[in-house]
Image (spheres, helix red, strand yellow):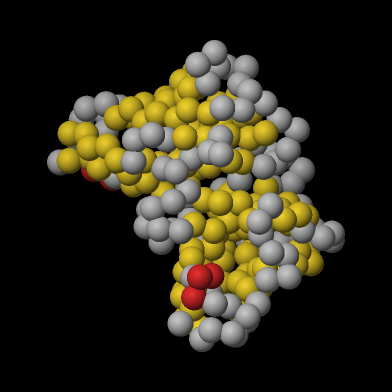
């Protein structure tokens, strides 16, 4: 049973436009969420996080939104750049643990 | 920032041999490290949680006798794939939590590509 889902395996966006990556979860005990970016044959790189007590966190071009009632979070990248092309994973942490559950990833391609 | 290294980055071995993968936190102490594996076009799957000085906690379905984990110091954890078979071929990634703070974020190593012939 996949507790964290990224239903879009891929996304293409024109350079300069907004990229929106979505993530849904089923476990109401998740209390912390992360977004990671991953290039092929490399480890994931932390992008941005959000606690379950917040609904928005912004860091430069990256903004994460959390809708707890819908069990949905999204990552907005604006403006998108070709260097943003990578696979993006969302991850959710079970309350009281260090354990993160990862989504299946969305491959973002930013077209120049 | 916190840096995690892995060695080797790639390894090719014959079926039946054992392979050791090292995970090091270079500039911080990591009381807890995690081992993941990733199959092509799939998510990172947590294999085990490794705490310094104690036995690793394995996720359901992961054979602890096949994937031996040792966390002997605050900067080093090792994963040994014993009697490797072609189905063990995968991308193995470790991550670490910076102690005593930083429980929210895991720092990942660059990964190790294991190919078993």
Q: Is residue A90 left or right of residue B105?
A: left
Q: From what the image shows, is residue A72 above or below residue A86?
A: above
Question: Of residues B14 and B54, which is closer to you in this image?
Answer: B14
Image x and y of residue A66, in percent: 50, 20
Query: What residue appears at the point 51 percent right and 86 percent down from the top-left corner?
Result: B14
Q: Let me know if residue B4 appears in the view.
A: no
Image x and y of residue A98, in percent: 70, 41
Q: Is residue A79 left or right of residue A23?
A: left
In which quadrant will I find the C terminus of chain A? top left
Question: Of residues B116 and A109, which is closer to you in this image?
Answer: B116
Quadrant assignment, res A64:
top left
Image x and y of residue A90, in percent: 48, 37
Query: What residue appears at the point 66 percent right and 59 percent down from the top-left corner?
Result: B62
Q: From what the image shows, is residue A30 above or below residue B23?
A: above
Identify the residue at the far right of this view.
B54
Identify the residue at the far left of this view.
A112
Query: What residue appears at the point 82 percent right and 60 percent down from the top-left corner?
Result: B55
Total of numbered circles in the picture?
A: 0
Q: From what the image shows, is residue A38 above or below residue B53?
A: above
Image x and y of residue B39, in percent: 46, 58
Q: Let me know if residue B52 appears in the view.
A: yes
Q: From what the image shows, is residue A89 above or below residue B89?
A: above
Query: What residue appears at the point 79 percent right and 67 percent down from the top-left corner?
Result: B72
In which quadrant will I find the N terminus of chain A? top right
């Amino acid at each position: 049973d996949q507790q964290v889902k990224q239903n879009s395996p891929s996304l293409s966006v024109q350079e300069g436009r907004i990229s929106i990556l979505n993530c849904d979860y089923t476990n109401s005990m998740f209390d912390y969420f992360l977004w990671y970016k991953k290039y092929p044959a490399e480890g994931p790189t932390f992008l941005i996080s959000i606690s379950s007590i917040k609904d928005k966190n912004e860091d430069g071009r990256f903004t994460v939104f959390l809708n707890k009632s819908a069990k949905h979070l999204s990552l907005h990248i604006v403006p998108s750049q070709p260097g943003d092309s990578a696979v993006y994973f969302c991850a959710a942490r079970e309350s009281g643990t260090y354990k993160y559950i990862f989504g299946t990833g969305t491959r973002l391609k930013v077209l120049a | 920032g916190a840096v995690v290294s892995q060695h080797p980055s790639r390894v090719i071995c014959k079926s039946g041999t054992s392979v050791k993968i090292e995970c090091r936190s270079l500039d911080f102490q990591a009381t807890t490290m995690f081992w993941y594996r990733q199959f092509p076009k799939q998510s990172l799957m947590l294999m085990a949680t490794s705490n310094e000085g104690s036995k690793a906690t394995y996720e359901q379905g992961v054979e602890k006798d096949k994937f031996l984990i040792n966390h002997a110091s605050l900067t080093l954890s090792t994963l040994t794939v014993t009697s490797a078979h072609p189905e063990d071929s995968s991308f193995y990634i470790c991550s670490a939590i910076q102690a005593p703070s930083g429980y929210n974020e895991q720092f990942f190593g660059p990964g190790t590509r294991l190919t078993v012939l």
